[in-house]
Image: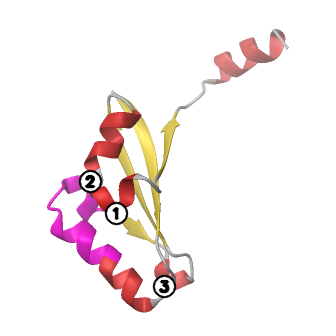
Amino acid sequence: MAKFFIELEHEAEKSACLRAAQILLKSGSHYLTNADFGCLDGVHKAWITVDVTNKEEAKAILPPEYRSGAKIIKLNKFTLAEIEDLLAHH
């Protein structure tokens, strides 16, 4: 499994924030019901981290109305040894 970071943006109106939260909470998906929102700080986005096989699987978790606008980013971590090895080759 790989880890993916999903960012969902919505309009800045209060009704859009509430609608986005409602859609994600009503989905029943563990991933979506645990989304973090930035609305109260003026950032009208929701963020979700998922462990799935690939980007297509991450996108499939989302409600259809959010799939086309979602940013899905595969996450990785580096060890110090990996960084040193990469730096030695550059």
Image location (x, y in percent) of residue 6: 44, 51
Disc 2 and disc 3: Cα gap in Å?
21 Å
In the image, taking residue 37 as reference, residue 42 lies left or right, namely right
Circle 3: residue type: Leu
Disc 1 marks which residue? 35
Quadrant that contains the C terminus: top right
Tag 1 and tag 2, C-beta contact below 8 Å: yes
Residue neighbourhood size for the residue with mark 3, other residues' Cα within 10 Å, grouped as few (<14), some (14–19), many (≥20) = few
Circle 2: residue type: Tyr
Specify start and end residues of the magenta stretch as a single range: 20-35
Disc 1 and disc 3: Cα gap in Å?
14 Å
Dot 1: element: loop
Disc 3 marks which residue? 40
- Marked residue nearer the N-terminal end (2 or 3): 2
- Identify the mark at residue 31; answer none if there is no mark: 2
Name the residue rendered at 29%, 56% in the picture. Answer: 64
Disc 1 and disc 2: Cα gap in Å?
7 Å
User: In the depicted view, which residue is nearer to us: 57 or 85?
Assistant: 57
Residue neighbourhood size for the residue with mark 1, other residues' Cα within 10 Å, grouped as few (<14), some (14–19), many (≥20) = some
Image location (x, y in percent) of residue 45: 48, 69
Q: How many marks?
A: 3
Residue 19, relative to residue 14: is it above or below?
A: above
User: In the depicted view, which residue is nearer to us: 69 or 18?
Assistant: 69
Please name the colour scheme applied to the rendered image: secondary structure
Residue neighbourhood size for the residue with mark 2, other residues' Cα within 10 Å, grouped as few (<14), some (14–19), many (≥20) = some
Circle 1: residue type: Ala
Name the residue rendered at 32%, 28% in the picture. Answer: 53
Instruction: Give the residue furthest to the bottom.
Output: 14
User: In the depicted view, which residue is nearer to us: 39 or 82?
Assistant: 39
